[in-house]
Image: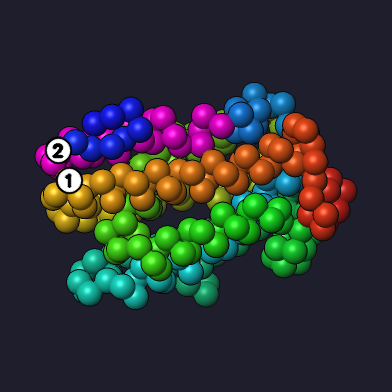
Amino acid sequence: MTPDFRLDRTLSADELEAVLRQVGHERYHIRHPFHRLMVEGALTRGQMQAWALNRYCYQAVIPRKDAIVLSRIEDRPLRLAWRERILDHDGDGSTPGGIERWMRLATGLGLDADTVASQRLALPATRFSVGAYLTLVEKRTLLEAIASSLTEMFSPQVIGERVSAILQKYPYVDEDTLGYFKPRLTQAPRDVDVALAFVREHARTVETQQLVVDALIAKCEILWTMLDALHFSYVEPGLVPPGAFRPGDGA
C-alpha cells in the first residue's frame, strides 16, 4: 500500500479493517483546525452558532441518506438492521431522534429553530458537501455506500473529546444542550458492527477493497470540507459569502 492508500495486493479482512482505521486516524476531522479550536475553548459564541447551524444540514440529511442505502439492500436482515439508523435520526414520532436533539443544541446556543430548519443561512460549501454525500450513496455501488458510513468508527473519540471540552470551556452550554451526543456513543458502535461486517464479507478482491478505501476517504473529505468552509468563513480570513449566516443573524 502506498502513502495515499493505493492497494497493491488483495488484503485479508483484518488487514483491510486496519487500513480503514488508518484512514480515519489520518483523515478524520478530529484533526481539523476548526475542531481543535473548539476543544481548546477558542471559538466565540457566534462561531459555535455557525458550526451548529451548518452541521444541522448534515444531520438533517442522514435519514435520507440511509433511506437511499436501505432501498438498495436486497438482504432482509441487513435491511432490518439498517432501518434502525433512520429511527435513530428521525425518531419514531414519540421519541425524539438525532435531528430534534441537534436542533436542541442549535437553539441552546441561541439560534432560532425555524431559521436553522430552513437551512437558508447555511454556507454554500455545506450544501455542496451534503449533496455530494447523497450522490455518493446513490450513484456508487452498495458496497461503497455502506463503506462510506464507517466514519462512525471514529466518532466516539471525537464525541468524547468534544463534549468534555465544551462543557468545561463554554459556560453557556449545559449537558441538556449537548443531548445529541450521548445516544451516539451506543448507536454508532452498533452501526459500525453491521457496516464493517458487510465490508469484510464483500470486499474480497483488490479492486473492491480499493473501492471501499476510496469511499471512506471520500466521506472523510466531505466532513473535512465542511469544517474548511467554517474556518474560512468564520475564523481566517473570515470571509462570509453573501446570504450566509453572520453572528447575530438567526438568533
Residue to which mark 1 is pinned = 206
Q: Position of residue 243 (x, y in %)?
A: 82, 58
Q: Quadrant of residue 67?
A: bottom left
Is 128 on the left-hand or right-hand side of 11? Answer: right
The relative height of residue 222 versus residue 141 in the rendered view (above or below) is: above
Residue to which mark 2 is pinned = 9
Q: Is residue 64 magenta?
A: no
Q: Position of residue 230 (x, y in %)?
A: 68, 42
Instruction: Determine the secondary structure under disc 2.
Output: loop
Question: Which residue is more in the foreground, 186 or 248?
Answer: 248
Question: In percent of the image, x 54 and y 41: which residue is there?
Answer: 224
- The rendered magenta stretch, by its main secondary structure, is classed as helix
Question: Which residue is more in the foreground, 69 or 127?
Answer: 127
Residue type at numbered disc 1:
Val
Instruction: Determine the secondary structure under disc 1.
Output: helix
For the question of whether residue 100 can be seen, the reply is yes
Is 110 on the left-hand or right-hand side of 52? Answer: right
For the C terminus, the image quarter is bottom right
Q: Does label 1 or label 2 sit earlier along the sequence? A: 2
For the N terminus, the image quarter is top left
Other residues around mark 2 within 10 Å, as few (<14) / some (14–19) / many (≥20): few
The mark found on residue 57 in the picture is none
Q: Is residue 10 magenta?
A: yes
Residue type at numbered disc 2:
Arg
Q: Quadrant of residue 96?
A: bottom right
Question: In percent of the image, x 36 and y 42: which residue is there?
Answer: 153
Alpha-carbon span between mark 1 and mark 2: 6 Å
Looking at the rendering, the stretch of residues picked out in magenta corresponds to: 9-32
Question: In percent of the image, x 21 and y 52: which residue is there?
Answer: 208
Confirm or deny contact between disc 1 and disc 2 (CB under 8 A).
Answer: yes
